Image: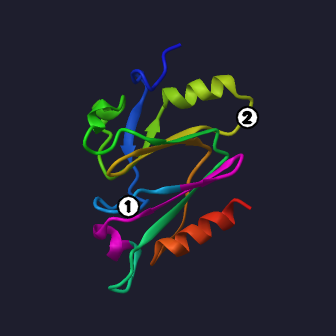
């Protein structure tokens, strides 16, 4: 069986998700809080999204918190924006500092083939400055956009209890 990490399959189709704030290009890296079946990702949002997801005070450092329920796979690691072209999905439209869903994902199909969980599997990819986040889960929900990372982290931790 060929892994998505080696090469994308013909069915993989990368689409941008505009309903989720874009990651900031010059900010600290994201953080993950996870339990057995829930993954919560928090990250600073791009300044271009401040107006759309705000309003914010001038001294705010807005962070987004996204919940991925029924997660069966997640990872946070290379590549980052400098070497994003080495990602197997780069040739299919994966772009820097963006939120994507991989439709007809070969990775989600591989994982579904070896797990007994019946939820629909969706494959999400979020690209950051130095890293890439991937998750296979049943869905995603933007829990909130907050004025500071401390608030986002508190919310993230409260969701895994």
Q: Is residue 151 above or below residue 130?
A: below
Residue 151 placed where, x, y %? 54, 75
Left or right: residue 89 versus residue 77 is left
Q: Cα distance, mark 2 to mark 1?
A: 34 Å
Of the 4 image quadrants, the one containing the C terminus is bottom right
* Quadrant assignment, res 27: bottom left
- Label 2 neighbourhood size at 10 Å, few (<14), some (14-19), many (20+)? few
SS under mark 2 = loop
Q: Nearer the viewer, residue 15 or 145?
A: 145
Q: Which residues are magenta?
A: 32-52
Q: How many numbered tags mark residues here?
A: 2
Residue 146 placed where, x, y %? 48, 75
Q: Which residue shows up at 27% across the image and 34% down it?
A: 85
* Quadrant assignment, res 51: bottom left
Question: Dot 1 corresponds to which residue?
Answer: 28
Left or right: residue 108 versus residue 84 is right
Give the residue furthest to the top: 1
Left or right: residue 51 versus residue 145 is left
Q: Which residue shows up at 64% across the image and 64% down it?
A: 157
Q: Which residue shows up at 44% across the image and 38% down it?
A: 102
Q: Which mark is residue 117?
A: 2
Q: Nearer the viewer, residue 140 or 40?
A: 40
């Amino acid at each position: 069986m060929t892994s998505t990490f080696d090469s994308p399959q013909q069915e993989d189709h990368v689409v941008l998700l505009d309903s989720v704030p874009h990651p900031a290009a010059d900010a600290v890296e994201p953080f993950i809080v996870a339990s057995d079946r829930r993954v919560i990702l928090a990250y600073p949002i791009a300044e271009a999204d401040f107006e759309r997801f705000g309003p914010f005070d001038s001294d705010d450092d807005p962070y987004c918190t996204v919940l991925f329920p029924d997660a069966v796979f997640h990872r946070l690691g290379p590549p980052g924006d400098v070497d994003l072209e080495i990602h197997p999905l780069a040739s299919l439209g994966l772009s820097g500092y963006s939120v994507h869903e991989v439709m007809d994902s070969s990775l989600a199909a591989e994982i579904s083939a070896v797990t007994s969980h019946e939820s629909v599997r969706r494959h999400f990819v979020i690209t950051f400055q130095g890293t890439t986040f991937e998750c296979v889960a049943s869905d995603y929900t933007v829990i909130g956009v907050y004025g500071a990372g401390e608030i986002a982290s508190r919310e993230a931790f409260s969701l895994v209890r």
